[in-house]
Image (spheres, rainbow, N blue to C red):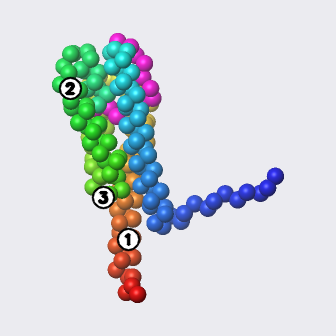
């Protein structure tokens, strides 16, 4: 058996470290979107009376699909689709501009506030503990990704300032 050395992680604050933070946050957003899609499709396929739920959902789209199923207010599906669409656009264009991670973070914060409102109004904290923990995880990940994007941008700007003339 050979002694295999583990690759050393990038130094904290290095460009590679910041890229990893940004990449990880994008992966967290994509994971949250995928789980939300699974739950919304389960809800649409099995009906609102079925209680199957897979781990975690971005709360606003899921509840709007649920309300559409229970109340027959299918216009709420449009609001769920718009929010999900904005998240998808942010995930696709994540590396193009800092605006996309920031937009995803702001909308996710609003989703978290909506979830807090839901928990308080419906007194459902105990049954939603997994959702609450996943929201905290995704929120921390998105914050780290935004911080990484800004730090990476700052590092790239300072590298351009101090770079000598090209030959």
Q: Which percent across, then down, holds residue 122? A: 29, 22
**Crowding at mark 2 (Cα within 10 Å: few <14, some 14-19, many 20+):** some
If you read the primary sequence from the N terminus, does the residue marked by circle 1 or circle 3 appear first?
3
Q: Residue at x 21, y 16 (%)?
A: 72
Does the magenta segment cover residue 7? no
Residue placed furthest toward the right: 1
* Nearer the observer, 107 or 7: 7
Query: Magenta segment, which residues?
Result: 49-60
Q: Secondary structure at mark 3?
A: loop
Q: Which residue was labeled with disc 3? A: 97
Task: Find out whether the residues at labels 1 and 3 contact each other: C-beta distance under 8 Å.
Answer: no
Left or right, residue 72 beside residue 124:
left
User: Measured along the vertical axis of the image, is residue 70 above or below residue 75?
Assistant: above
Q: Residue at x 28, y 32 (%)?
A: 60
* Residue marked by disc 2: 76
Question: What is the secondary structure assignment of the residue under circle 2?
Answer: helix
| Numbered badge on residue 156 | 1
Distance from label 2 to label 1 (Cα)?
A: 43 Å
């Amino acid at each position: 058996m050979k002694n295999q050395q583990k690759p050393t992680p990038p130094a904290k604050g290095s460009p590679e470290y910041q890229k990893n933070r940004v990449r990880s946050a994008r992966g967290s957003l994509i994971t949250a979107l995928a789980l939300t899609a699974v739950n919304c499709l389960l809800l649409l396929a099995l009906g609102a009376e079925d209680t199957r739920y897979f781990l975690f959902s971005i709360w606003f789209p899921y509840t709007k699909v649920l309300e559409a199923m229970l109340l027959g207010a299918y216009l709420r599906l449009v609001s769920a689709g718009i929010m999900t669409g904005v998240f998808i656009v942010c995930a696709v264009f994540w590396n193009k501009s800092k605006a996309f991670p920031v937009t995803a973070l702001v909308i996710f914060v609003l989703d978290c506030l909506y979830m807090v409102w839901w928990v308080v109004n419906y007194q459902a904290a105990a049954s939603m503990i997994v959702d609450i923990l996943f929201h905290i995880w995704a929120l921390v990940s998105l914050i780290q990704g935004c911080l990484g994007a800004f730090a990476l941008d700052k590092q790239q700007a300072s590298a351009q300032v101090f770079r000598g003339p090209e030959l």
